[in-house]
Amino acid sequence: MDKKNKNPNVPNLRFSYKGDWSKRKLNEICQFFKGNGLSKSDLSNEGFPCILYGELYTTYKNEVIRDIISKTNTTLSNPFLSRNNDLIIPGSGEDPIDIAVARAIYQNDIILGGDLNILRPKSNVSAAFLSYQLNGVRRYDIAKKAQGKSIVHLHNSDLKEVLVSIPTYDEQLHIAKLLTKIDEMIETQSKIIELKQSLIKDIEDRILWKTTNTQTKPIREFLTEINNKSIIQNQYPLLSSTKKGLFLQTDYFNKEAASSNNIGYKIVHKGDIIISPQNLWMGNITYNDKFDNGLVSPSYRIYKVKEEYNAFYISRILMSYRALSLYKNISEQGASIVRRNLNVDAFNELCFPIPNIKKQDEVGLFLSKLHQELKCETWILMQLKSQKNYLLNNMFI
C-alpha cells in the first residue's frame, strides 16, 4: 500500500493502482427507486425474505448484508424486489447521523419495504464500495441532506446530488474485499465475546448464588456508603457510570471532561462500587477497576466494600443477573419507563449469600481471570474496529 499521497485526487492509503479518482454525483452512477409497503406486523416465521427500513438501524450493522433475517407472507400488489449489487439507505429516522447509513445487497428478489431509498449502481460500480464510502467519509454529506425535526427524512432527490469519488472497478473491488474481510473478523470476534459473556453469566449464577456453606447477609454488613464531595475544581477527570462500565466523559459523550461547575460531584477511587438509584434495576452498577480517582454526578451513590470481604467477589454478586430482579422489586416507577427510583433503605437490607473469606478469595480470583480474558477479547474487537475506521478515513477521498 502507498501511504500519504499528496495528490488530492487519490486517497492517503492505496493499493498498487495508478491514476486519479473521478468525482461523480450519485445520480450519474446509480438509478434510484423506492421500496414498497411492509411493516413489522407483516413479518412472519416463514415466507419470502424481506428487509424493513428500521432493520438498517437494529439488525444489519455491516456495510454489506449477507444473511437476510426477516420473512413475510404478506402479498403485495407491486413488491419491489432487490437485484444483485443494490444499495439501500433509510428514508426516515430520528437523527440525521443515524439515518445516514448505507447497506449493499448481493442477492436477488429480496422484498424491500417502504421508506427505503434504493440505489442501483450502473455497470462497473460496486455497491459495497459505495456503501463503505458513504458510511465513512461521506456520512456527514448525507446527514446534511436530511430534513425535519422530531423525525428526519431523506429523499432520493437529496441523495442524487451527493458527490462520491470513484476509481477503477478493479480497485473498488479490491478495497471492498479488504473491508469486508475486516467486517467478517469483527463479526466473529463479537460472537466470541457474546459466548464468553454468556458463559461467565452462567458460571456466576451457579457459583455466586450457591447457598451451601454460606451465610445470608444484608448489604449494610459488607458495604459502607461514602460521600466524598469535590471542593477543588478540575482535580479529577469527570466519569460516567453506565451498565457497560465506567467511562471518561470525554471518551463516552465526546464533550469536555470537567466543567467549572463540578463542585458537589462525588469522588470515586479504585475499588469503589457506583450505583445509579434511578437505573440500578437495569444494571447500572459499576465496580471501579479502571480509574485511581475520578468525579461522578451527585446523583450516583458510592459504596466501599468493607476490608474483611473480597471486593471483586462482592462486586460480581451485586452485578449478577439475579440481583437485578431484587433491585427492581424495591424500585418504584419514575418519570419514564426506564427510570425506577430505588428505595435506598430497602437496598441496604437486601440479603445475599456470602461464603467465608477464603472461599470469596478463591472464587474472586477465578472470576477475575475470566473477566480478564473477556477484556482481552474486547480489546481485540476494539482494535479491529479502530483499524476499520482508520481505513475508512484513509482509503477514500
Image: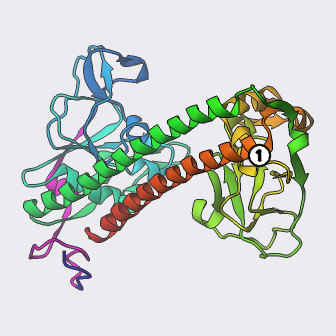
Query: Image quadrant of residue 67?
Result: top left
Query: Image quadrant of residue 340?
Result: top right
Callout 1 secondary element: loop
Residue 20 among those drawn in magenta: yes
- Residue 116 rendering spot, x and y as whole percentages: 32, 37
- Residue 130 rendering spot, x and y as whole percentages: 23, 55
Quarter that holds the C terminus: bottom left
86 or 367, nearer to the observer: 367
Q: Amino acid at mark 1?
A: Ser
Question: What residue do we see at 90% from left, 33% from top?
Answer: 349
Number of numbered tags placed on the structure image: 1
**Residue 30 located left or right of residue 95:** left
**Residue 348 located left or right of residue 52:** right
**Residue 195 located left or right of residue 323:** left
Quarter that holds the N terminus: bottom left
- Residue 256 rendering spot, x and y as whole percentages: 66, 70
**Numbered range of the magenta stretch:** 7-33
Question: What residue do we see at 15% from left, 32% from top?
Answer: 108
329 or 362, nearer to the observer: 362
Badge 1: how crowded within 10 Å, few (<14), some, or many (20+)? many
Which residue matches tag 1?
A: 276
Residue 334 appears in view: no
Question: What residue do we see at 84% from left, 56% from top?
Answer: 298
Q: Is residue 340 above or below residue 316?
A: above
Residue 311 appears in view: yes
304 or 331, nearer to the observer: 304
